[in-house]
């Protein structure tokens, strides 16, 4: 075995191990989502469909939190869609790295989330002819997808077995879970300012507008600030 092959084997084991660790860590929130989905009145199949098809934690928590607070289905869908628009930017960044074609593109789109993108970009894009970045993306995406959906099912079934989930304080976990998913994305003073500004706007609007609208207002503010900031940097 030559030196390059030996280095690749070491790098591959490390990448796969890290991907598995991320999958297990994220799965903890999946259990909460499964429980909270049924708490809001969704059936187990409906809750599972969100994890299988939507598969973006922040958007899923946004949807169920909007429904839990009394928002309409339309408001919940729009709010969760706005939360997930960042995945489009991830896809554009990862496309030249993954070089997928045909049905593989559809699978790649489904697995393009915060964790898989971060792992893919964390590798040297030129290392091992790009194999490190591609392996990191696919290993992380698959690990999170499989374990997130398993965890969602466990959470949904567990709530059905224990009775009224509100007696365990699971309703409070909606905000906690969403916060835990969003916080790692705050990496600059601008991000922090937008986050606090959006939170203040949502708090101010909550007593005077229908449920779900405060979330939409905060998201729209974040989009406007991001657009203005991007123009200044270009």
Image (cartoon, grey):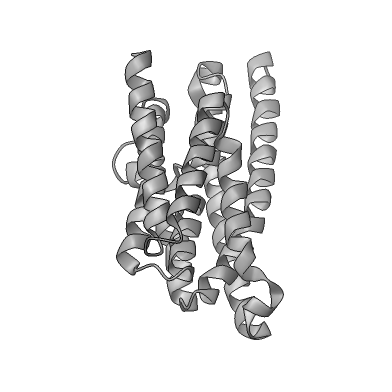
Residue at 42% over, 67% down: 49
Residue 204 in sight: yes
The percent coordinates of residue 212 (x first, y second) are 40, 60
Q: Nearer the viewer, residue 24 or 171?
A: 171
Residue 193 falls left or right of residue 19:
left
Q: Nearer the viewer, residue 147 or 100?
A: 147
Residue at 37% over, 48% down: 217
- Residue 94, picture quadrant: top left
Residue 84 in sight: no
Residue 130 falls left or right of residue 222:
right
Q: Quadrant of the N terminus?
A: top right
Residue at 49% over, 38% down: 197
Q: Nearer the viewer, residue 16 or 94?
A: 94
Q: Nearer the viewer, residue 112 or 219?
A: 219
Residue 136, above or below 207: above
The percent coordinates of residue 208 (x first, y second) are 40, 60
- Residue 161, picture quadrant: bottom right
The percent coordinates of residue 73 (x first, y second) are 34, 68
The percent coordinates of residue 175 (x first, y second) are 58, 57
Residue at 69% over, 40% down: 17
């Amino acid at each position: 075995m030559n030196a390059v092959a030996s280095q690749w084997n070491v790098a591959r084991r490390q990448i796969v191990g890290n991907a598995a660790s991320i999958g297990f860590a994220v799965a903890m929130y999946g259990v909460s989502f499964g429980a909270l989905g049924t708490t809001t009145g969704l059936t187990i199949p409906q809750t599972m469909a969100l994890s299988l098809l939507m598969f973006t934690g922040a958007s899923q928590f946004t949807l169920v939190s909007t429904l839990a607070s009394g928002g309409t289905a339309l408001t919940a869908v729009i709010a969760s869609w706005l939360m997930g628009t960042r995945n489009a930017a991830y896809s554009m960044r990862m496309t030249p790295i993954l070089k997928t074609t045909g049905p593989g593109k559809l699978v790649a789109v489904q697995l393009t989330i915060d964790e898989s993108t971060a792992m893919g970009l964390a590798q040297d894009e030129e290392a091992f002819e790009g194999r490190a970045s591609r392996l990191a993306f696919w290993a992380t995406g698959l690990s999170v997808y499989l374990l997130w959906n398993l965890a969602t099912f466990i959470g949904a079934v567990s709530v059905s077995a224990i009775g009224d989930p509100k007696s365990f304080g699971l309703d409070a976990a909606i905000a906690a879970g969403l916060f835990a998913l969003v916080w790692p994305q705050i990496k600059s003073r601008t991000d922090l300012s937008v986050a606090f500004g959006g939170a203040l706007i949502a708090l101010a609007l909550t007593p005077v507008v229908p449920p779900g609208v405060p979330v939409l207002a905060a998201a729209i503010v974040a989009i406007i600030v991001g657009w203005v900031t991007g123009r200044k940097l270009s």
